[in-house]
Amino acid sequence: MSYTLPPLPWAKDALAPKISQETIEYHYGKHHQGYVNKLNALAKGTDLKKKSVEEIIKTEKGKAYNLAAQIFNHTFYWQSMGPGCGGEPTGKLAEAINASFGDFASFKKAFTTAAGTHFGSGWAWLVKNGDKLEVCATHDAGCPLSDGKVPILCCDVWEHAYYVDYRNARASYIEAWWSLVNWKNAEAKL
Amino acid sequence: MASAESDAFELPPLPYNKRALEPAISEETLNYHYGKHHAGYVRKLNALADGTPLAKKTLEQIIKTETGKAYNLAAQIYNHTFYWNSMSPNGGGAPRGNIKQCIERSFGSFENFKAQFTTAAGTHFGSGWAWLVRDGDNNLKIIARSDAGNPLSEGLVPVLTLDVWEHAYYIDYRNGRGDYINKWWGLVNWDHANKQLAPSSKY
C-alpha cells in the first residue's frame, strides 16, 4: 500500500482570511504532505505497508503511530472546517450535544477551554464515546481512534496551525475556527 | 492583580537587543518569543503562585519538586532564559576552552557532536528542547525532551539548549526547522557553555 495525501475539501483560499492561503499551503502542502512522505519511506519494504492508516493507529506505537495519526488527524481537521460554515448545529447533532453537554454554550465553552489550555502540541476533539459525546484534548499526534472513540470534530492546536495568521494568539484562532466548523460533516460522523 | 513589586518571579532581561541575532533570528521573533511567550510564562506562574507556598520557591526548586502546571511554567521560564543565554551575536564557530575538550572527550570531535545534536533537535516530534548536558560521571550527553522538559529534574547539568517549539522558528523559517538549526550553530554561545561547566557555577 502506498499512502497518499487526500485532496483538500475546498480551494486553498477558501477559508481566508480566517485561515490564510499561505497557512494552508504550508500546513497541507508541507506538514500534511510530509507525514505522508515519511510514512511511505518508513513502510517501504516492511510489513507495515500492508496496514491502512487506521490499522496503524490502532496497532502501532512510536514513529509509525505518529506519522499515521498525523495523516488521519489532519485529514479530519480539513473536513471539520469549510467556507460558509460556522454558526450552530441543528438536527441530530444539536440534540446529541444538548443531551451530553446540556446546551450548545456549555459544549462550546468546554471545547474552547480544551483547545485553549492544551500545553504543547496537540488537538482538541469532539468525540462519541459509546452513547455520549465528549470533549477531549490529545497530545502531539494523539488520535481518539486509539481509545476506541469516534471522532466527530477536531481543531489542530500545534503552533504551525495558527502561527502564520495569529502568532501566539491561539484564542483568536480558536474563535476563527468556530466560524468555520462544518456541522454537516460532523453530523455525518455520528 | 498582583503588583510588580510583589511578584515572586521576574522576566530576566534579554542578554542583547532584539535585533542582535538577525538575520538568523529576527526582531519580530524575539518580540513574540521573549515579549509574549516567555513573559507569558512569568505572568502565569505569578498568578498561580501568588499567596501560596509556591511563591517562596525558586524556579530550580519548582523544577526539581513540582509536577503539572507549576512545573511546566517554571521550567519554561528557566528554559527560555537558558536559551537566550545559549546564543550570542558574537557566538558561533568552533568551541573554545573547556567545552572544546569536553566535547572531544565525550563525542570524539566537534563534528560528531554537531551532527548528533543537529539530529536530536531536527527529529524531535512535537514541542520541546534539545539539550547538551553534563551527567554525574562528568560526561557530556545530548538529550531531547518534550514540551517543558528540563534536565534539572533528572539530576543533569544543563550546558546548552535549543528551543524546537514551532514558535521559535515559524516566523523566520516556517516549517524549515533544519534551516533554523543550521543558523543556530552560527550563534552558539560557547562562553555560556563554559560557565555551566565550571564546578562552582550555579544557574
Image (tube, rainbow, N blue to C red):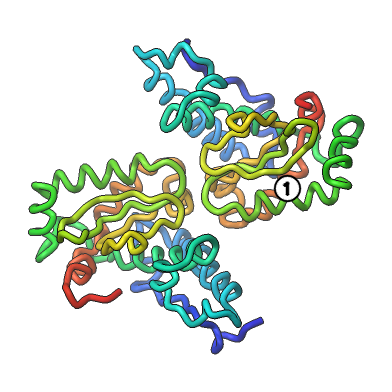
Disc 1 is placed on an element classified as helix
Residue B55 visible within the image = yes
In which chain is the residue bearing label 1? A
Give the amino acid type for the residue marked by disc 1 in the picture.
Answer: Phe
Please say if B59 is above or below B69. Answer: below
State the image coordinates of residue B40 (x, y, percent, origin top left).
55, 67
Q: Is residue A8 left or right of residue B162?
A: right
- Residue at the (68%, 54%) spot, across then down: A172
- In the shown orientation, is residue B198 left or right of residue A40? left
Residue positioned most to the bottom = B5
Position in image of residue A43 (x %, y %)? 40, 18
In the image, taking residue A180 as reference, residue B26 lies left or right, namely: left
> Which of B51 and B166 lies nearest the eye of the viewer?
B51
Q: Is residue B31 visible?
A: no
Q: Image quadrant for the C terminus of chain A?
A: top right
Q: What residue is pinned by disc 1?
A: A111
Front residue of this view, candidates A58 and A78: A58
